[in-house]
Image (cartoon, helix red, strand yellow):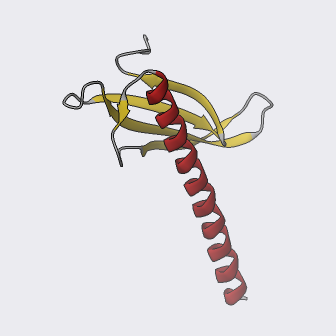
Amino acid sequence: MSELLLLIAITAASLYWLAAMRCKELAISIARRECNKCEVQLLDQTVHQHHLSLSRDSTGQWRVWRHYKFEYSEDGDSRHFGSLIMLGQKVTRVALETFNPIIH
């Protein structure tokens, strides 16, 4: 019985890891696309997950809510921050510090 539980736990962890890697690859792709659209350079290896939680989508289904942060440069010397929010595998918001800041 304990072997079965261990197998289920390993399988669940593996499936979560695969989904997390797909979401990170999507976040990198979206951040790169947004930086290209604003004609700035996405700094390599700067996209990282900042926050993780559960939230409901528009249909009421529970989804994993991920907040990613990244850095970009306008001129090669300066560093600015951007953020990207995903609900499940759907991007809900992308913001670059110097282009479309979020006003609270």
Q: Please identify the residue farthest to the right as the structure is shown.
A: 59
Label count reads: 0
Residue at 66% x, 42% y: name it.
Answer: 89
Residue at x 70% of width, y 76% of height = 8
Residue 101's place in the image compared with 87, above or below, is: above
Picture residue at 46% right of the left edge, 39% below the top: 68
Looking at the image, residue 84 sits to the left or right of residue 74; the answer is right
Against 103, residue 50 (above or below) is: below
- In the picture, measured across the screen, residue 97 lies left or right of residue 24, that is left
Residue 48, how many percent across, how many down? 41, 46
Does residue 68 appear left or right of residue 8 in this picture? left
In percent of width and height, residue 47 lies at: 41, 43
> In which quarter of the view is residue 17 placed?
bottom right
Q: Quadrant of the C terminus?
A: top left
**Residue at the (49%, 43%) spot, across then down:** 28
Residue 56 spot, x, y in % from top left: 70, 34
Q: Is residue 14 above or below residue 27?
A: below
Which residue is outermost to the left? 77
* Quarter where residue 80 is shown: top left
Question: Looking at the rendering, in which quadrant would you find the N terminus?
Answer: bottom right
